[in-house]
Amino acid sequence: GAVVSQHPSRVICKSGTSVKIECRSLDFQATTMFWYRQFPKQSLMLMATSNEGSKATYEQGVEKDKFLINHASLTLSTLTVTSAHPEDSSFYICSAASGGAADTQYFGPGTRLTVL
Amino acid sequence: KNEVEQSPQNLTAQEGEFITINCSYSVGISALHWLQQHPGGGIVSLFMLSSGKKKHGRLIATINIQEKHSSLHITASHPRDSAVYICAVRGNTPLVFGKGTRLSVIA
């Protein structure tokens, strides 16, 4: 089956620093990648949808200048949390689809970000 | 926007019990996903279905498109089934997720 990896799995950083999270599709080409955020005991919330080679589409309320998304290749998308603050501490999950937004999504294992 | 409701929110079962988790949604969809999220956070896709019934091992998923309802069944439950089970629906927009059902299976 299709495999999606994320790196790092866990990161702790100081307030004000930037953190980059990578999402890779290991055995298929991901035309579309999705970034989700999940707070404790909450459901996943879509942050943005990215298509390879084009700008990401952000959901309402998600600051595009704070959460920078780059989908430079068909197997890699990165999410950079800039000037992280404690309220950005969360579980970030990516998923990838070989087709568009309506295609089957394969989920990564997630990255737990803790901002001190 | 599609509203996805899951029930129950929390479920505790004895090992071996038959378990049912329900999911209802408000707007017509093209497909419904059942996902499993373990305590570490990683998500595994269990099923994607648009009609009828699918079975994989001890897991069975059904969907009734007319009633906008799906169920996930676990037969002969085991402690390793303890996880959060999430229903997500897909229409013309990306997935909309339910809040999940937290299942604890006690030996």
Image (spheres, rainbow, N blue to C red):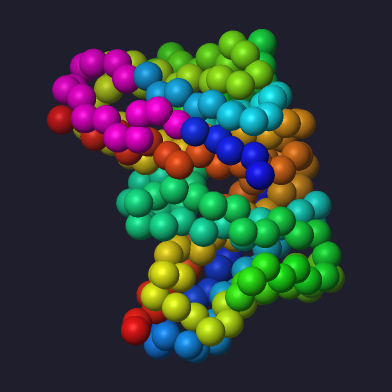
Q: How many labels sit on residues? A: 0
Kindly identify the residue that appears in the image at 32 percent across and 20 percent down.
Answer: A19
Asked whether residue A90 appears in the rendered view, the answer is: yes
- Which sits in the foreground, A116 or A107? A107
Any magenta on residue B76?
Answer: no
- Which sits in the foreground, A60 or B5? B5
Asked whether residue B27 appears in the rendered view, the answer is: no
Q: Is residue A25 left or right of residue A89?
A: right
- Quadrant assignment for the C terminus of chain A: top left
Q: Is residue B18 left or right of residue A22?
A: right
Kindly identify the residue that appears in the image at 58 percent across and 16 percent down.
Answer: A71
- Which sits in the foreground, A83 or A22? A22
> In the image, is residue B81 above or below residue B32?
below
The segment highlighted magenta reads A6-19
Pinpoint residue B24: horizontal percent, then vertical percent. 66, 68
Tell me the quarter of the picture where residue B18 sits. Answer: bottom right
